[in-house]
Image (cartoon, grey):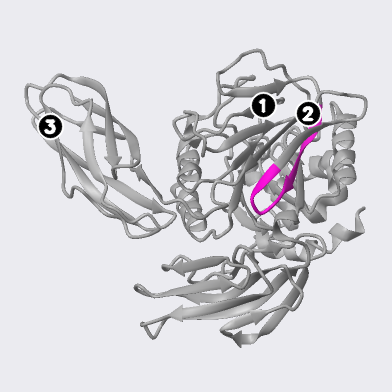
Amino acid sequence: MIPRLLCLFPFLLLAAAPTRAQQTLQLPEDGVVVRALPADAAPARVCAPGARWLRLGFAELTLRGEDRLVLASDGGDRLALAGPQWEGRRFYVRALRGACVSLAADFHDAASRYRLSGYQAGAQPLQATTVTVAGAGDLCSDITPGDCVKTSDLVIAINPTVALAIGDNAYASGTLAEYTSNYDPAWGRFKALTAPVPGNHEYLTTGASGYFDYFNGAGVQTGPAGDRSEGWYSYDVGDWHFIALNSKSGGTVSSAQLAWLDADLHADTKPCTAAYFHHPFISRGRYNGYATLKPVFDRLYASRADLALVGHDHDYQRWAPMDGNQVAQADGVREVIVGTGGAELSPVTRTHPLLQASQGDTFGVLRLDLTTTGYNASFVPIAGKTWTDSFSGSCHRAQGVVGDFLLSGTTGISIPRGSSGGKLITVTSYGGFNAPVTLSLSGLPAGVTGTFSANPVTPPPDGSITSRLVLRVASTATTGTFALTVSGTDGKFVRTFAIKLIVK
């Protein structure tokens, strides 16, 4: 066991099982000083003599109307906080260079307020401060138990701050007995530092009860694996925000999880973001990927997340950064499939223009060395194997939050001839986006017209606004199924949303 990491367990438990106060765990980098401030502290200035940077923790931040709180460091960094997205949350903001941070409250509403919980301070330059995360999916099977032990040996040697177990962790059905016999002797050696997500094999046991019993405790509702009814949570590692999502068996992602993800992304102040879940959005291994994850990928791209780490395919695949339409984007989300944790491997026999590296014959784990501006990543093979991969990237929000928007709604509508129907189109802001979005509709068949109840629409910063699309179908319209596209543009970005229209 790794003593340094054992001490993280109570904090990881707190993060993965957030209270109604929505406390987001902040794991510090090695050597960082952590200090608490007196309860109800609302200082105008926080200093740590000799520090090269500070990361402030908030016990409360309520901002009403146009009120805002501006953080400015003596190292020249500035962070402006505005909007309601932090209300009811306890969190740490991104690190700011310097030994002192001033807080300037531009409050006009009596309900606006803030309280600090503490701070983290580093003695090394911020750009030289690193933290390490390691992980893999498709882990421990009684068919190939030795390979799961070998990948767990890699994690112990890497000695990360957090280990990611990316689903299908205990074969074949994720029962508690299989977790105890297959997983625990290997990856269970660093259970205290593990932040897991479930896979489809966990859900072969009703409600993934074996998974939740193992990580949370028998019958315990919340714990390191999140709430049993959800299975999603988030936390911060250094200046990275990590989002653990539950793709269950690869089906439709629930509206509850998407709403939670929206709120989590809106409250993220970190310059770098990674999400992880079991099923791949795109793949060229045994599977093609899961289109059901497009709403997740759309949101990750709109908020300029950097990495999506997945498994399910028992191989390794590194993809170029892309958007939710699987189109290459310089500021896109890079998916990495690392289903090489110990379960029987399968080959990658197909190609794709965005597939940059792949293999299906070497077990190993992904190592991420993270900074406040980017990442250096490598595939680490088990002992006796030599295949490896390495890549790096800069965080899309390292120079500031990027404003963008997303269109969403239900994807299908059926209308008889001679009648009309409607559906709500939601325009959601990310990164403080607050500009008019002009909507348009294409793909209409003869005899069908469409209008929007409001056009253009302007979403509030990090909020949403709706416009009702009304489709009128003439009695002479052609019957059949038609693919419609709703487009929205602010003059800089064009975002689209697909609707399947059935004319009966």
Q: Is residue 373 magenta?
A: yes
Q: Secondary structure at mark 3?
A: strand
Q: Nearer the viewer, residue 66 or 127?
A: 127
Query: Mark 1 or mark 3, which has the lower sequence index?
Result: 1
Q: Which residue is mark 1?
A: 317
Disc 3: which residue: 449
Q: Residue at the spot x=81%, y=52% of the render?
A: 191
- For marks 2 and 1, the one nearer the N-term is 1
Query: Against 222, is 291 above or below?
Result: above
- Viewer-nearest of labels 2 and 1? 1
Specify the segment rendered in magenta. 363-375
Which label belongs to residue 343? 2
Q: Residue at x 74, y 20 (%)?
A: 360
**In the rendered structure, which amino acid carries the disc numbered 3?**
Thr
Position of 158 compared to 340: left or right?
A: right
Say whether residue 98 is magenta: no
- The amino acid beneath tag 2 is Ala
